[in-house]
Image (cartoon, grey):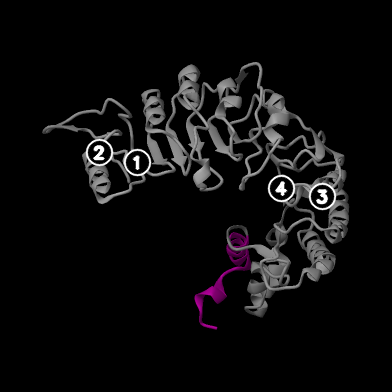
Amino acid sequence: LRSPVKRLPPEILANIFHFCVVHGSDQIFMSIVVQGPLYDLARVCHTWREVVHSYPILWTDVNFYFSDSYPYPFANRTEDVSRVIPALDMWLKKSSTLPISLTLTDVRDYHSVTRDLIYILVDRLRNNSRRWRSISLQLPGDYYPLLFTFTPCDLASLEHLSIDGNMYGQGRPTVAHLNLQSATNLKSFAYNGPGNFVNDRISVAWNRLTEVSLGFASRPGVSNTLRRYIRQLAQCQNITTCSLGLGLPIHAGQPITLPYLRTLRVRPILFGCHARSVVDALILPQLQALEIDAVTLVTQWVERWHDCQFSNLLARSSCSLERLHIRNVYFPIEELLRCLAHSRDLKSLCFIPYPRNDISSELDVSRLAGAELVVSPIVPRLQELKLACTSETTVERIMKMVVSRVGASANA
């Protein structure tokens, strides 16, 4: 009773609880039991329980997670509907009329039993269409034809939509149409479509978007997403952030100029893909950050999936690149040096390629020449440096470079 927390006004407690819900571990693991931060907070005491149930803002983010990784029988899928729908309905009721964010992640394989859950999910999406602020769905692509039937509907509040499906279908070829024409406030759209077995079609105002992700998968696979929507990418004239997953070969055709793009993320997701399919067509005059990584560390992926694509991109774009991050992907030192030659304004460099090698002797960003402090001929404005190394000798060389750049307020 003497604890200072007892004297906090309910409004302050509600703000603290909201931070816990939004930034804490808020997944509801449906493979076990319906639970989450709100349930834990409500169990502390009567006062906290009253706050939890009195502030609708605490019920505006709901996250369901399905997995077979727990030691529960496969038949538990039959309980999906009885667990998810009451919980979702409770969130919709408790949040009053506030916009709500829904995340549903199903990492299990496709099964016809789960279609019952998708049917009811579609019903809830349609009946509460004006309330959705953000929708993030990750589930097998076989559900897409059914899932997409929640459109067309009035999605006036929708600002973010992410749909991520695996690329390995088990069903018969079919058509799926996602109609987002009513989502006039949609700014962020991420889509990773299924394989060839689903002929997906998306209707959206591409020119209104500020962030686009196409085929940017978290796992390797045969993705058609970027190949199908490369022409729509040219319509995204207002995007500032773009994430692209390189899969099957693409013929971009005409150059694609994105005048306001500031951040580009590129990821090879298919063995044998090549950056020329997409990167050669891009012109990005305002590019400030270039991030390149891979979905997996596989020895067989050590191949030339690019040549001079990225250095040529920087050269023809005449941009002022400030951030270059390369992680866990094949990237020869020669191409890195060419990129740095076109990045005089670079402030942050992360170079952790795969496979690792000794790059310190070839990449020297030090600022000391003898006893005098001078500006390095490359990346003179560098402030942050992250490098991978393979031996103690390499570590010593890297540390010397870091120490020499203290005058530039470097962090490493």
Residues marked 2 and 4 touching at CB (< 8 Å):
no
Q: Indicate the secondary structure of the residue bearing disc 1.
A: strand
Q: Amino acid at mark 1?
A: Leu
Q: Residues within 10 Å of mark 1 (few under 14, many from 20)?
A: some
Q: CA distance from mark 2 to mark 4?
A: 45 Å
Q: Is label 3 or label 2 in front?
A: 3
Q: Locate residue 387, reporting x and y percent.
A: 35, 43
Residue at 69%, 66% (x, y): give it.
Answer: 29
Q: CA distance from mark 1 to mark 4?
A: 35 Å
Residue positioned most to the bottom: 1
Inspect the magenta stretch and tell me whether residue 267 lies in it.
no
Q: Is residue 310 above or below residue 141?
A: above
The residue under label 4 is 166
Q: Indicate the secondary structure of the residue bearing disc 3.
A: helix
The residue under label 3 is 143
Displayed quadrant of residue 373: top left
Q: Earlier in the sequence, mark 1 or mark 4?
A: 4
**Range drawn in magenta:** 1-21
Please state which of residues 15 and 386 is positioned toward the viewer in this rendering: 386
Q: Is residue 259 above or below residue 79?
A: above
Q: Amino acid at mark 4?
A: Asn
